[in-house]
Amino acid sequence: MLSNTCKYAVRAVIYLAVWQNGDTKIGIKRIAKELNLPTPFLGKILQLLTKHKLLNSTKGPNGGFSLAKPANEISLYDIVTIIDGNGLFEECMIGLKICEIDKSKEIMCPFYQKSHPIRSKILSVFKEQSVGEFASGIKKFGDILNF
């Protein structure tokens, strides 16, 4: 459903929400080590999130990354659409193109009729689920929601 790149982005943003303290920045090496991700690849992901103003980035010895806004204001949808686009929520799940060409034909598709309510619910969950809620759950339950 989500690309590995997107999963890494979500995990990294949640990690920042859990461990960020005030204005402190968290270095990429620490994030990569804790999440067991390759540093150069994670760097590209975090720079993309910074470009889209989800994260702040500071270079130098005391540099690193931090959230650009409160964790409760960042939804999973925000991260997914930056990394993977909105295809998960809008494109045909089985790859048929007829509905993309003519939206009026969606209701004629038996798969669309059955999948659309589920897909709408998934979209709602991604828009409503905040990074802050994840961070609170991890802080509350610790290893149960391990990265």
Image (tube, rainbow, N blue to C red):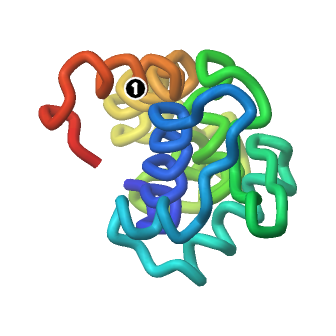
Q: Position of residue 47 (x, y in %)?
A: 76, 64
Q: Position of residue 4 (x, y in %)?
A: 42, 67
Say if residue 122 shows up in the picture. Answer: yes
- Specify the farthest residue to the front: 61
Whether residue 82 is situated above or below residue 34 in the rendered picture: above
Q: Residue at x 76, y 59 (%)?
A: 63
Whether residue 124 is situated above or below residue 80 in the rendered picture: above
Q: Nearer the viewer, residue 46 or 105?
A: 46
Left or right relative to 56: residue 89:
left
* Location of residue 21 by image quarter: top right
Secondary structure state at the residue bearing disc 1: helix
- Mark 1 neighbour density, 10 Å: few (under 14) some (14–19) many (20 or more): many
- Specify the farthest residue to the left: 144
Q: Residue at x 43, y 56 (%)?
A: 7
Q: Position of residue 88 (x, y in %)?
A: 52, 48
Q: Residue at x 50, y 28 (%)?
A: 126
Instruction: Name the residue tied to disc 1.
Output: 134
Q: Position of residue 144 (x, y in %)?
A: 13, 32
Say if residue 121 shows up in the picture. Answer: no
Q: Residue at x 67, y 61 (%)?
A: 46
